[in-house]
Image (spheres, helix red, strand yellow):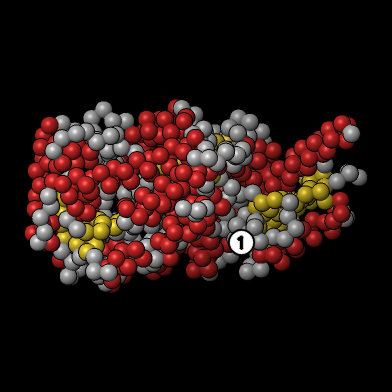
Amino acid sequence: MGLDVNDLFHLFTKVQDDLYYFAKKAKQGGEKIAGFLCTYSPQELFHAGGYFPVRVIGGEGGTPLADQWLQPYACSFAKSVLNLGLTGDFSFLDLVVFSHTCDTMQNLAEVWRRRVEGIPVIIVSTPNLNAGEIALTYLKRELVRVKEEVERISGDKITDERLLESMRLYERHRNNMNRLYQLRQANPSLMTGTEMFVVVLSSFLMKKEEHNTLLEDLIKTLENVPPQEIKRPRILVGGSVCQAQGFIQSIEAVGALVCNDDLCMGSRSYVLPPVPQGEPIDMLAQMYLSRIPCPAFHKPGYDPAEIYIEKVKAGNIDGVIFLQTKFCDPYAFNYPYLRKRLEQEGIPSLLLEVEQNQPVPEAFRTRVEAFVETLNNR
Amino acid sequence: MSDYFVIGLDIGSATAKAVLVDNEGKKCAYAVRPTGGRLVQSAEDVKKEVLSKTGVVEESVKAIITTGYGRDIVQNKTKSLTEITCHAKGAYITMPDIRFVIDIGGQDSKAILLESDGQVGRFEMNDKCAAGTGRFLEVMARTLGIHLDEMGDMALRSEKCSKISSTCTVFAESEVISLLAQGEEIPSVVSGLCRAIAERVYGLASRVGITPPIMMTGGVAKNKGVVSWLSKVLKQELIVPEEPQIIGALGASIIGLEWVKKNNETMNKITQNI
């Protein structure tokens, strides 16, 4: 192989200049692209149906076209994504997949279906209660319906063999990402949070086959790197931002190190229990229900604070920064409880409300800097 | 005369402040000037002013700590710190039993909870816009055709208090104009504006957890109308230091002094070992 870490990063960073560099290249080569807005979209099904699944992410800038159709209290992610849909920036997509998570996502799917022309829409309805026999039966039926819809649109049958193959590919990818998270938890000096998030971002925008190769090379290289002393405060970021990179860069610019996360476009998508054996659709349904639930979902017995406390302890984290997208009700609902539990454990935390389509504001920097100063004084 | 001195510079959006302390932490001089658009120049000006007031030469200044939104642009600084850390320190030095600081400056407002040792516990900062800050009062004074400094006394003297529901500077301005058109007296409108700021800060402060004794710092603390309304809505007496505007710069200078002393100790240890 002969690639060093910097060469590898160069390959991961391709998505920074153009998020859809790989998707557009594949499209030119005659491949079909499926855009998904939420990680509860069963990417394995679309992969098995011959699509290259990429995550639909918003961009920086105003949302004048979307403001016409969405209320002011819709989040900046929804607005930004719809605006890019309306300007034709997503015209390279052959299919767009929505999941029923929060109210905004549900409504966005219908607005998109009516206003963005030329791209078929598939909606996956995941049960809000993420546990029990009824939820499992419901999701299995839903996945069968989605599978048939993909087959109808593509005119191509998704066999069990192909689905199993795609599932194995995705599982291998999750295991690789999980391994990278483990390595970094044990040795945060391996790379900065900003670098880690380049890897995370690319993981949603590159082909899993290619990302796996890069990840496996990276892991092999990093496994032999000895830990270095870290003098900077160690931060865990949690919240509801999809593209966290700018914020993470800003947090690290004032002297902290982002060591771990609880983000959808982050560890929440990759830290999963092993997939049980059985029929492919059954396995898939069980897997999605066994995830760390999205704040829009409910799972009896699941305590969101436990994840934070566990990660803080395991990674010697000094403080938690919540990046909460404005108007993200599901996450805002969890926050008071999370803050209280962290306080009880003596873990300092800072809440920052953010807009995903705007550059990091000055007030954000001042607050993070003040938080880092208090951590340094402890 | 003292062996050495330390300067704290607080370069805010409206004013630049400097405080010069001696090696025992005694405040020797301070200066306040408008910032305007020239951050670097105003920082240089207030620094020169405290030096010339005391006759201290620049060579005997051992550290310059900067804070405020212009903290990073100032040249030849020892280090920069956020206003939150500096206001907490300044308040603690002025009165060690202070547990809570409300700082309202030119373009932001902050609520800071202090630990009993003076360290910052929790804090909140306004994040939407300049609503409920010094800039808000400046714009309103201009709309009303009065001077900023008159507002406090005017609000205190007024028996009536107009209802102003918006703290957005632009919306409140049109609200003020329609109040005047309805025949409301200027003092009553001014009192209403002070209450609007107080109510906004109340929201900020309660998110942090109001813990007396409370000190108010920053330029707006000079407005007696805001202070009076704030103590009404907080149901607490507020402690306003003699010069509330320089508390951030004072805090910066004290942190600088601690930094110099710590460095001296380390140097002494090294020298002893040699």
Residue type for callout 1:
Ala
Mark 1: few/some/many CA within 10 Å (<14, 14-19, 20+):
some
Determine the secondary structure under disc 1. loop
In the image, residue A84 lies at what x, y percent? 30, 67
Horizontal side of residue A327 vs B46, given as left or right: left
> Which residue occupies the foreground of this view, A78 or B54?
A78
Name the chain letter of the residue that bears numbered label 1: B
Vertical position of residue B174 compared to residue A166: above or below: below
In the image, residue A299 lies at what x, y percent? 23, 33
> Which residue occupies the foreground of this view, A153 or A76?
A153
Q: Residue at x 44, y 48 (%)?
A: A217
Q: Residue furthest front?
A: A1
**What residue does disc 1 label?**
B14
Horizontal side of residue A191 vs A214, given as left or right: right
Q: Residue at x 53, y 61 (%)?
A: B135
In the image, residue B229 lies at what x, y percent? 49, 47
Q: Residue at x 14, y 42 (%)?
A: A281
- Residue B145 visible at all: yes
In the image, residue A378 lies at what x, y percent? 60, 34
